[in-house]
Image: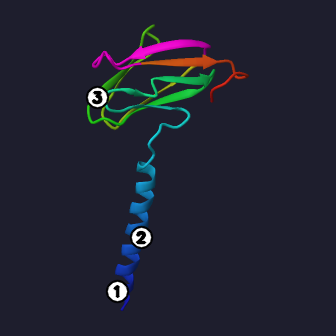
Amino acid sequence: MKLVRMLMLLGITLYVYSCDEGIDQTNDQPGAKEVWMQNIAFVPQQKTIVVGTTLTWINKDAEAHTVTSNSGLFDAEVEGGGSFSFTFNDVGIFGYACSIHPNMKGTIVVNESTGGGY
């Protein structure tokens, strides 16, 4: 009888765990401080944030991408499933691209804290 209860508890635990994991994986849009690399594109292509925000690029593709600033501010290779974070401490417009896939381009607009964004 104890074995049956233990197996039932294990089954319930695994079911709950798989449901929790599924919830995390159903997010179909990046969070307020995220940019995804997905289907060989930056999603969203343009992101507006406030100065001091740490933005994280998350690679949802299986292949590697880079997050390479047009001005040399940052340059990171991000393997499939990996991520890269950068804190924007200056107001401005910051262009970037993937050096592996030149058609992957994005822009980060950084506003003062009293303006829009996150």
| Residue at the spot of label 3 | 64
User: CA separation, marks 2 and 1?
Assistant: 14 Å
Q: Residues within 10 Å of mark 3 (few under 14, many from 20)?
A: some
Tag 2 near tag 1, CB within 8 Å: no
Residue 4, disc: 1
Judging by the rendered image, the residue that carries numbered circle 2 is 13
User: What's the residue at 31%, 15% (across, down)?
Assistant: 102
**Residue 38 in picture, x, y percent from top left:** 35, 33
Magenta range is 90-105
The amino acid marked with disc number 1 is: Val
* Rendering colour mode: rainbow
Looking at the image, which is closer to me, 105 or 89? 105
Task: Give amino acid for label 3.
Answer: Ala
- Residue at horizontal 56 percent and vertical 34 percent from the top: 32
Q: Using residue 18 as the reference point, say whether residue 34 is left or right of it.
A: right
Residue at the outermost bottom position: 1
- Label located before the other in sequence (2 or 1): 1
